[in-house]
Image (cartoon, helix red, strand yellow):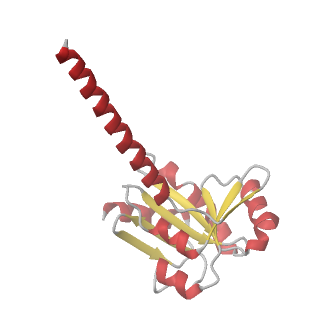
């Protein structure tokens, strides 16, 4: 009888320890996620607004996903032309872990007026965030020191791998860049 009670007590202690460590690790993982300063909502979509320091947390991925950051703005014609190509990336590479994040450089005052209506009207599927970055030198140092701030720009990350482009892509060029990046 004592052996049964002891085993029950051991199971209880083990379960409690597992529960404590599981809860602590999920809290730590959640606290590691970049936190926006603000969320702005439209009719069907919302966008999160980040400052440079919070956005910089995106630039250190720890999983095996390929992150594609496309820097753009609603006033940039070449940006608007290539957005659908980036939005379709995950579909082309169905068996790969790819996450596209559109980083809007639109002014904060234009989010409700221009940005959200654009992503709603064009049925953009990828995540769209706004980067509230007035200090372009600091932004460039976080993303890529060679970046002048010109749009469109693209940053591709996976672990320690990094590729940065300051050009507009055709759909075929983008697919080739992604294939070459994944073959590294």
Instruction: Kindly give the residue lying farthest to the left in the view shown.
Output: 3
Q: Is residue 66 positioned above or below 163 on the image?
A: above
- Image quadrant where one finds the N terminus: top left
Instruction: Kindly give the residue lying farthest to the top in the view shown.
Output: 1
Which residue is more in the foreground, 143 or 92? 143
Residue at figure coordinates x 75%, y 67% from the top left: 111
Q: Position of residue 75 (x, y in %)?
A: 73, 75
Left or right: residue 130 versus residue 158 is: right
Q: Is residue 8 positioned above or below 100 on the image?
A: above
Left or right: residue 146 versus residue 79 is: left
Q: Position of residue 4 (x, y in %)?
A: 21, 15
Which residue is more in the foreground, 147 or 176? 147
Q: Position of residue 28 (x, y in %)?
A: 43, 54
Instruction: Kindly give the residue lying farthest to the front in the view shown.
Output: 2
Residue at figure coordinates x 38%, y 37% from the top left: 19
Q: Is residue 181 positioned above or below 23 on the image?
A: below
Left or right: residue 177 versus residue 151 is: left
Q: Is residue 157 positioned above or below 64 on the image?
A: below
Residue at figure coordinates x 41%, y 73% from the top left: 163
- Image quadrant where one finds the C terminus: bottom left
Left or right: residue 80 versus residue 152 is: right
| Count of labels in the image | 0
Which residue is more in the foreground, 146 or 25? 25
Asked if one can make out residue 148 in the rendered structure from this viewpoint, the answer is no
Q: Position of residue 180 (x, y in %)?
A: 36, 65
Asked if one can make out residue 106 in the rendered structure from this viewpoint, the answer is yes
Which residue is more in the foreground, 71 or 2? 2
Query: Quadrant of the rendered structure where residue 48 is?
Result: bottom right
Residue at figure coordinates x 79%, y 64% from the top left: 112
């Amino acid at each position: 009888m004592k052996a049964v009670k002891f085993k029950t007590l051991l199971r209880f202690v083990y379960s409690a320890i597992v529960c404590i460590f599981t809860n602590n690790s999920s809290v730590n993982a959640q606290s590691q996620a970049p936190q926006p300063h603000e969320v702005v909502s439209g009719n069907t979509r919302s966008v999160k607004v980040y400052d440079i320091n919070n956005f910089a947390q995106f630039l250190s991925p720890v999983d095996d996903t390929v992150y594609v950051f496309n820097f753009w703005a609603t006033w940039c014609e070449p940006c608007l032309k290539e957005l659908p190509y980036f939005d379709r990336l995950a579909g082309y590479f169905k068996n790969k872990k790819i996450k596209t994040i559109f980083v809007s450089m639109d002014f904060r005052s234009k989010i409700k007026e221009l940005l959200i209506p654009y992503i709603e009207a064009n049925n953009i599927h990828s995540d769209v965030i706004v980067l509230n970055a007035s200090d372009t030198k600091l932004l460039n140092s976080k993303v890529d020191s060679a970046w002048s701030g010109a749009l469109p720009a693209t940053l591709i990350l996976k672990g320690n791998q990094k590729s940065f482009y300051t050009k507009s892509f055709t759909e075929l060029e983008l697919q080739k860049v992604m294939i070459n990046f994944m073959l590294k």
